[in-house]
Amino acid sequence: MSIRPPTLREKRRYLLARIDPAGTIVEAKDLYYAVYEAVVSLFGDVAAAAMQPSVLAVENGYVILRCRRGAEREFAIALSTLSACRDCTVAIRVLAVSGTIESLRERIATLVPLVSAALGQDAAPAQEGTADPDTCRYRFGSTPVETVVWHGHKVDAIEKGFKNTRRLFLTTEDLEKIHATTIPDGL
Amino acid sequence: MKITDACVYPYPLGDSSVRRFAFEARSYGYDSIVAADTPVAEICGVTVIPGIFLAGMPAKDVQSRAKKSRGTGAVVAVQMGDNRFNRAVAGTSGVHILRGIHTADKRAFDHVAAKIAVDNNTALDIDLSPLIFGRGHLRQKAIHRYLDLMILYRRFEFPLTISSSARSVLALRAVREVTGLCSLFGMDETDVQAALAGVGRVTDPGESLVKVIP
C-alpha cells in the first residue's frame, strides 16, 4: 500500500512525559500495554480506537507518546490514571504536547542536562546480597537507608532490612549521617 | 486563595516524608497540604496543615474529638457513614470535611445533609484515589457518586475539597491533572479552583455566614 500524501494523512499529536520515580527503567513495550490499559479502562474500546494511543520512544527517563489530534486532552487524563508498569509503581507526568517528534526531542535535549546537573549523586541500587558499607551511610529517623537517586534536595532511598526494602521518597534534610563525628580534619 | 490538597499521608503512614511531599506539592502547583499526624509547618513556601482523619467512630465520639481539636489549627475530616450519621456529623461544629463519599451508600448524602453542610460550612471531599488507582466497578461507583454530589453542589453550593489521599509522592497529581480528572464527572475549571481552595474556606470562612440584604 502506498503512503498517503500529507494532506490525506491523519493529524497526530505527540506528548512528552517524564517517568517518575527517577531512575526507573521501563521497556517501551511494557509501557505501551500499561498506557493502553489505562486508556481502555477509562474511556472504553471505542474511544481508545479513535484515540490511537502509542508509545514511540523511551529515552533518558522521558517518554514520547502519540495520539490522534484532538484527543490529547483525554489521553493526558488517561495517563494521569496510570500508576504501574508491569510490577513497578510509576507515574507519568505530561510535560508538553507538540505536533512533531523533533521538537520534543529538542526539549528532551534541553531537559536532560538540567537533570544531570541536579543529580548530585546517582547510584544504582546495590545488588541483592552485596553489602557495600559506603552506600549505607545514612538513616531516616532510626531506619538505615541506602540512597538510590539524589536530585537536588530530593533523595530516593531504599529502606535497609531483611524483608522490608521499600523505596522511600525523602529530602536531604530528612537524612542523617550514620557515625557522623565531630572530629576535625586535622586530627 | 490557597490551593490545597486536602489529604496526604506522609511517613510512616506512607513512603514519603512530609518535606518531600511539600517539595513535590509546590512543583505541582499547590500552596498547602493537609497531612495526617503532622505538626503545622511551612516548608519551601508550602503550608503543611495537620489533619485529623476520623473513621469508624460513633457520632458522639466524633463530636468529642472535634471539640478537643478546636483551636489547634488542625483540619478535622470524618469518614462518611450512613445517612443518619452524616447528618449528625455535618451539623457538628469543629468538623471541617466529610470524606469517603465514594464508599458510602447511595442515599448516604441527600439534600437534607447537603443543607446541614451548607449551614455548618462543612465541606464534602472528592477523593481522586479511586479514579487514579481504581478500575472497573470501583471507579464507576466513584464517578457515579461524584456525579450525584455535583447535582447537590450546583443546587446548594456547599464547600468542596479535593484530595489525592496520596501515601506516596507518586500518587500526587498536578493541578492540571486534577482538573482533567474532575472533568470526568462534570466539574469545570472554576469548580476545581473553588474546590482546591475549599480547605481555606472551611477553616477560615472570612466573611460572615449571614448576609444582611437591605
Image (cartoon, rainbow, N blue to C red):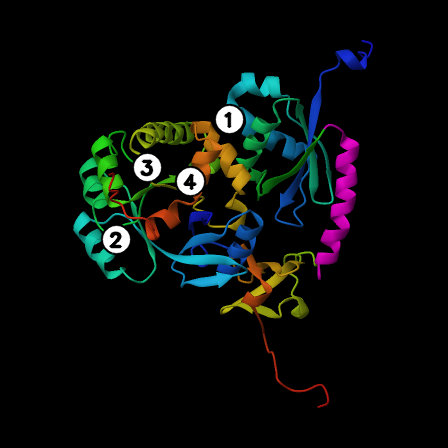
Establish whether labels 3 and 2 are both on one chain: yes
Q: Position of residue B76 (x, y in %)?
A: 31, 52
Determine which of the numbered discs, if any, sits on residue A41 in the image. 1
Amino acid, disc 4:
Ala
Determine which of the numbered discs, if any, sits on residue B94 in the image. 2
Tell me which corner region of the image, top left, top right, bottom left or bottom right, holds residue B89: top left
Structural distance between the alpha carbons of marks 3 and 1: 22 Å
Structural distance between the alpha carbons of marks 4 and 2: 21 Å
Establish whether labels 3 and 1 are both on one chain: no
Camera-nearest residue between B204 and A31: B204
Q: Name the chain letter of the residue that bears numbered label 2.
A: B
Q: Name the chain letter of the residue that bears numbered label 1.
A: A
Q: Main secondary structure of the magenta part?
A: helix
Q: Residue furthest front?
A: B214
Amino acid, disc 2:
Gly
Is A187 situated left or right of B195 in this image?
right
Query: In what element is the residue under mark 1?
Result: helix
Query: In what element is the residue under mark 2?
Result: loop
Vertical relation: B210 (above or below) A44:
below
Determine which of the numbered discs, if any, sits on residue B101 in the image. 3
Amino acid, disc 3:
Ile
Amino acid, disc 1:
Ser
Among the two numbered marks 4 and 3 on one chain, the one whose residue lies closer to the N terminus: 3
Give yes or no for residue B52 being in the magenta stretch.
Answer: no
Determine which of the numbered discs, if any, sits on residue B194 in the image. 4
Give yes or no for residue A101 being in the magenta stretch.
Answer: yes
Q: Position of residue B80 (x, y in %)?
A: 27, 41
Nearer the viewer's eye, disc 4 or disc 2? 4
Instruction: Write the start and end of the magenta stretch as one range.
Output: A99-121
Q: Residue furthest top?
A: A1
Establish whether labels 1 and 2 are both on one chain: no
